[in-house]
Image (spheres, rainbow, N blue to C red):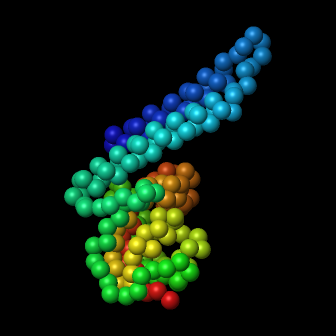
Amino acid sequence: MKGINARVLAGLIIALLFMFMACNQTSEQQRVPDPKEIRKTFEESNKILLEAEKQEILDFISRYGWDMQESGTGLWYKIYHEGSGAYAQSGALAIIHYKIHLLTGDLVYSSETDGAREFKIGRGGVELGLEEGILLMREGDKARFIMPSHLAHGVPGDGVKIPARATIVYDVELVELK
């Protein structure tokens, strides 16, 4: 909950900064904000949001007692069952079984109801975090990925079940590589 409040606070700070810039007038002319100022404000706001999201993820991992590693991009992962097949490589067709949850615990998508998912590794069309995570796996592996929003569905969410700026938790089995 603390992380959500930090996100709300960061959003309010951004809104107030823009309102201040819009309302601040010099003489009778409205001051045009310097693009460098705007960029700096966005960078600072994004940094605050990323830190808040990372803290939410750390709290989540701690709450469940999971032993996970963080990649350089911010993907958290744990391969909890090792298969014996070939390692995933870019260009291969991956077939996965999966469950996708929000940090609230809500199940949003599952191969049990939506069917197995197939995609060409490295060709896009799936979350960046899934692409990265699958490349750590081999056929038969089961893993858990926690994807911050920038590796999942970003600012807009998916427009269906995953809300804006949502961190998602993937439980995935790499069933087959072709």
Residue 63 located left or right of residue 6: left
- Please tell me in which quadrant of the rendered image residue 167 appears: bottom left
- Please tell me in which quadrant of the rendered image residue 30 appears: top right
- Looking at the image, residue 59 lies above or below residue 38: below
Task: Please say whether residue 106 is visible from this viewpoint.
Answer: no
Residue 155 located left or right of residue 31: left
- Looking at the image, residue 158 lies above or below residue 28: below
For image coordinates 47% across by 35% down, the residue present is 10
Task: Please say whether residue 131 is visible from this viewpoint.
Answer: yes
- Residue 122 image point, x, y percent: 56, 73
Query: Observer-nearest residue: 42 or 170?
Result: 42
For image coordinates 42% across by 82% down, the residue present is 87
Q: Residue furthest right?
A: 29
Query: Observer-nearest residue: 151 or 14?
Result: 151
For image coordinates 55% across by 27% down, the residue present is 16
- Please tell me in which quadrant of the rendered image residue 120 appears: bottom right
